[in-house]
Amino acid sequence: MSATTLDVSEADLQTVEAMVKAAGTSFYHGMRVLPPDRRHAMYAIYAFCRIVDDIADEAGTLPEKRSALAAWRDRIAGLYEGRSDDPVTRVLAAAAPRFQLRAEDFIAVIDGMQMDAETEIVAPPLEVLDLYCDRVAAAVGRLSVRAFGDSSMAADRVAYALGRALQLTNILRDIHEDAQRGRLYLPAEYLAEAGVPADPAAALTSPGLPLVCQRIARRAHDYFRTAAREMRQCDRRAMKPARLMGATYDAILSALEKRGWHRLEERVSLPAWRKLWLVCRYGLF
């Protein structure tokens, strides 16, 4: 087995890669800038996140979801005790010691998914929203920067800021879709100050909603700037994927602002030429 592809079978590597490719996400192509061992570690991290996210989001009773997430907590513990039972856990078990992936970051991701599974999140306080962003996004970032090749404190600070920037951008992009699912991730304090009801359907038509969205957008931009500043303290080569993700989501945030906050049902995405330009600009240099 080549040292560049982790010490697991080619069949496991192919299975995990196929899971990511089948998700139809640009993440699959974005990670192609990484060396094979780091790329497959990232594919396994993504596959893990996708699996636990599906547990939280898909149909099932709350006891069933709790049981499934608890099983994944046990499987993560097993990675660090020499136990693995499927392609995802076998690849993660090989990647964890090589790239200093921390068990607490995997557990934080599961805790974030449990927040979504336990209740329909509606107008959380800022403190709760920040905890949610840390668990579902920044914790993924803390795993990712290590797989990218930088386990420094500065890299953790990149994960802290970039994870929040990405998640807040997702929240702004998905306001209409989330409301249809009975969810509203905008913070209670901002809603109250703008006179927006803490009700998903009613919030969509409130005159004060654009003010709330603008505040969240400014907060996201601040996090993007902080992440970019911290990246300058990191290994430049290792941060290539982080720069690419940051630039891509910053462009999405700008596109959302350009569309405005009165036509939330209009989905925003980047044209293919813009994605290619970003890959060339941030992924290759």
Image (cartoon, grey):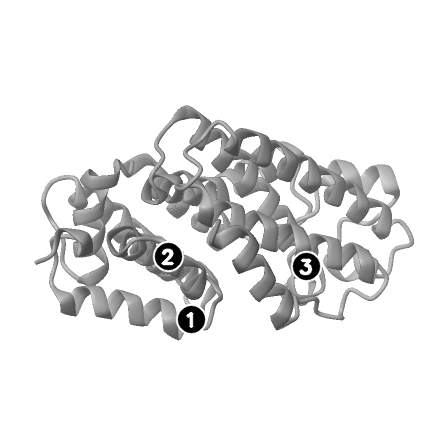
Q: CA distance from mark 3 to mark 1?
A: 19 Å
Q: Residue at x 81, y 58 (%)?
A: 258
Q: Earlier in the sequence, mark 3 or mark 1?
A: 1
Q: Type of residue at label 2?
A: Tyr
Residue 184 appears in the figure:
no
Q: Are marks 1 and 2 in contact (CB under 8 Å)?
A: yes
- Residue 66: which numbered mark, if any? none
Q: Residues within 10 Å of mark 3 (few under 14, many from 20)?
A: many
Quadrant in the picture for residue 43: bottom left
Q: Are marks 3 and 1 in contact (CB under 8 Å)?
A: no
Vertical position of residue 28 compared to residue 126: above or below: below
Q: Type of residue at label 1?
A: Ala
Q: Earlier in the sequence, mark 2 or mark 3?
A: 2
**Number of callouts in the render?**
3
Q: Secondary structure at mark 2?
A: helix
Q: Position of residue 109 (x, y in %)?
A: 40, 45
Q: Position of residue 164 (x, y in %)?
A: 58, 41
Residue 117 appears in the figure:
yes
Q: Secondary structure at mark 3?
A: helix
Q: CA distance from mark 2 to mark 3?
A: 21 Å
Q: Residue at x 19, y 62 (%)?
A: 87
Quadrant where the N terminus is found in the figure: bottom left
Q: Secondary structure at mark 1?
A: loop
Q: Which residue is mark 1?
A: 23
Q: Position of residue 10 (x, y in %)?
A: 14, 66
Q: Position of residue 226 (x, y in %)?
A: 61, 32
Q: Residue at x 67, y 55 (%)?
A: 251
Q: Which residue is mark 2?
A: 46
Q: CA distance from mark 1 to mark 2?
A: 10 Å
Q: Residues within 10 Å of mark 1 (few under 14, many from 20)?
A: few
Q: Which residue is mark 3?
A: 173
